[in-house]
Image (cartoon, rainbow, N blue to C red):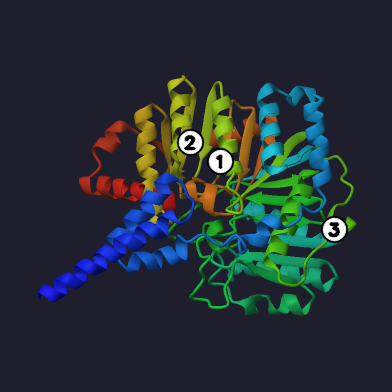
Amino acid sequence: MQLFLSIITAVLALNILFSIITVFREKRDIAATWAWLVVLVLLPVVGFIFYLFIGKKPSRKKIFDIKNQESIGMSQLVEAQKRKLIEDEQLLSRKQESENTKEIVRLFLEDDGSILTKDNSVHLFTDGFEKYESLISDIYEAKHHVHVMYYIFKDDKIGTKVLKALEERAAAGVEVLVLYDALGSRSLKASFFDHLKSLGGKTQSFFGSRFSIINLRFNYRNHRKIVVIDGKVGYTGGFNVGDEYLGEYEKFGYWRDTHLKIEGSAVLALQNRFLMDWNAAAKQDQLAYQEGYFPTIIKKGETNIQIVSSGPDTEIQQIKKGYIKMISLAKESIFIQTPYFVPDDSLLETLEIAVMSGIDVKIMIPNKPDHPFIYRATTYYAAEMVAAGAQVYIYDNGFLHAKTMVIDGEICSIGTANFDVRSFKLNFEVNAFIYDPKVAKQQEEIFYEDIKKSYLLTQNILNNQSNWLKFKQIFSRLFSPIL
């Protein structure tokens, strides 16, 4: 018995020692360091397996090539716009220019090399049927190429409809490229695309593994959703490809999301992002600049847009910085919609300062989880914001998956990034930051319409929650830096 206790003591001591070595040997923020230390110490052996799959950072060599992918066709435009800012020349149209917009534009030019585009028209979709009707129609009109990237692509009714449109265009000689995330599309069999490939189409999975069960890059996912058609029409936002996004899963009910259709020069920035991600994923079939990818754009509107990317290939967290900048610049109102509300300390404090400064802060989250552990952390932080004085609405008409923010009816962000640590640090994301009061007001109107299908989270509701529910929220919050 004494020998057994000695062995157990030695194992626990070694576990603590290796836990400390493992966590501190990689650079990460303090909150994530402590969260992983708790996991490794409290779950001997099992914690290390968990860490191996979702905690270990990819080596600099593997995160790779993503960081080193050459920006295709954009670098000269970025440098020209930086010079204009330095020389204080006008970048935005007079009626859409303000000190707020100029500050955010400068931030993204410096941090992300994101060009400002000024000739766009934008259409907002909040319903999956309308989005896919438009997308499929535009695919059938393609003459030169269709570039598709989704986190989730499923072999179901809507997935098959999209595939049929892609196959028809490939058969007509149009270049068709499909990039999907290996984890998000894990239920998708490679054979799903066999006919498309036989017609000349090409596909790639992002951060896949030769072994379907073992994938040490499991935690770093390409969460972007981008479609570019002929370099002239672009789509991005929250909708993936699957029947649940049409509200056909009873578990979720109606699926409320926000997606953009863009025509104008911002499409070229989406194109650039797609080509870089394709080249990062493809061992062969590397893409190079060609004029057909970047056609001359006929002015479609007057909406100003910057396409901004972020991911674990950089420590900058560009989209999070954009959110912080928007919140700190707000003078009247901040409206946020997100399925996951798990802010880090910097974002949480910035929001609390806004509330205490008298700014109208409204946050909308779903009434049900698609990932229960993350949802409990979401409700914990929602309670924090209620206590601070913000209005938190629970969308009660299905599942809310929109990722939007609008400030002062002037500037808005719509894209793929949730309001959580994972989107800021671990996922590859893309957002459109839009500097157009017309679009911002439209997004505000959508928010107010959603309020009609929501209920206000009050302190009384929070006080009446069971102790077990409160414990789950507090427990989940401890692991928010690694969710």
In the rendered image, the vertical position of residue 54 relative to residue 115, given as above or below: below
Viewer-nearest residue: 46 or 294: 46
Kindly identify which residue carries mark 2.
347
Kindly identify which residue carries mark 3.
289
Disc number placed over residue 56 in the picture, else none: none
In the rendered image, the vertical position of residue 432 relative to residue 196, given as above or below: above
Task: Name the amino acid, label 3.
Answer: Tyr
* Sequence-earlier tag: 1 or 3: 3
Real-space CA distance between mark 3 and mark 2, rounded to the nearest whole angstrom? 38 Å
The answer to whether the residue labelled 1 contacts the one labelled 3, judged by CB atoms less than 8 Å apart, is no
In the rendered image, the vertical position of residue 52 relative to residue 319, given as above or below: below
Question: Dot 3: within a 10 Å radius of its alpha carbon, few (fewer than 14), some, or many (20 or more) residues?
Answer: few
Q: Where in the figure is residue 240, as x and y percent of width and height?
A: 59, 58
Task: Name the amino acid, label 2.
Answer: Leu
Viewer-nearest residue: 358 or 10: 10
* Sequence-earlier tag: 1 or 2: 1
Real-space CA distance between mark 1 and mark 2, rounded to the nearest whole angstrom? 8 Å
| Mark 1 element type | helix
Kindly identify which residue carries mark 1.
320
